Image: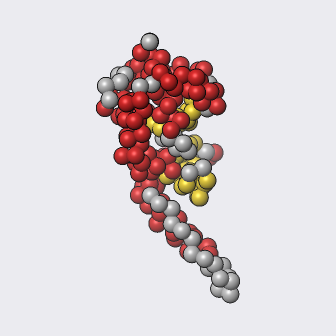
Amino acid sequence: MDEMFLYKIIILYMLDRIDEYTLTNTQLANFMQGHGLPNNFNMHEALSEMIELGFISVTTIRDTQHYKITNPGEEALYYFENHIPNSTKQEILDYFKKEQINLRKESEIYADYYPADNQEFTVECVIKERKDTLMNLKFNVPTKGLAVSICDNWRAKSTDVYNYLMKELAVANPDTEHPEPESPQP
């Protein structure tokens, strides 16, 4: 069997098993290199080919690509999954179990910025829980440096910001009782 074919099926398997999360280049490379699989060049070649075929989708957040399997990718995996050794499948599941918190953090709490009108930058800070968006803040800032700083600090401060906003906004009417909002798990 062609090695590149196997790499592609392994990547599809990984993306399929991660469910509602995405995987980044780094996360894929960490698993692959830790298990004697392709080097970065081969992995990127496999990813490019699968994007071109429509088997995976990619979104870029702050210069990091996030990959997700598509319906055609799931269909291809269905037909070829049996080519992946069971030991490799188990290694993938063990990796996800071990890295669950890190994978979730990277997929569910993120920030990005992009140029806006008037030489400003729009910052978008997001907290997701599985497929649901808990918070999506968008605001403009005057400089790129400030946008970068906000994005860099978002993951560490997102839970505090979420709790603060929920507490402040839930006290709109003291006569109305509101249940305490649950904090997102970082």
Where residue 79 appears, x then y in whole percent?
58, 23
- Please state if 157 lies on the left or on the right of 72 as rendered: left
How many numbered circles does the render carry? Answer: 0
As displayed, is residue 35 above or below residue 124? above
User: What's the residue at 61%, 53% (across, down)?
Assistant: 132
Q: Which of 50 and 11 is in front in this view?
A: 11
* Location of residue 180 in the rendering, given as x and y in whole percent from the top left corner: 57, 75
Q: How is the image coloured?
A: secondary structure
For the C terminus, the image quarter is: bottom left
Would residue 146 be visible to someone looking at this image? no
Comparing 86 with 105, the one in front is 86
Q: Does 180 appear above or below 150?
A: below
Q: Pick the residue in front: 112 or 145.
A: 112
**Horizontal arrangement in the rendering, residue 23 relative to residue 55 (left or right):** left
Percent coordinates x, y for residue 20 in the rendering: 56, 44
Quarter where residue 171 is shown:
bottom right
The residue at the point 59 percent across, 58 percent down is 134
User: 15 left or right of 96?
Assistant: right
**185 sits left or right of 133 in the view:** left
Q: Which quarter of the figure is the N terminus placed in? A: top left
Extreme residue toward the top, this view:
2
Q: Which residue is drawn at 40% across and 36% down?
A: 90
Instruction: Tell me if I can see residue 93 in this picture.
Output: yes
Q: Nearer the viewer, residue 17 or 60?
A: 17
The image shows residue 68 at horizontal and vertical percentages of 55, 35
Quadrant of residue 155 within the rendered picture:
bottom left
Q: In which quarter of the image is residue 24?
A: top left
Vertical placement of 18 versus 45: above or below? below
Q: Residue at x 51, y 66 (%)?
A: 183
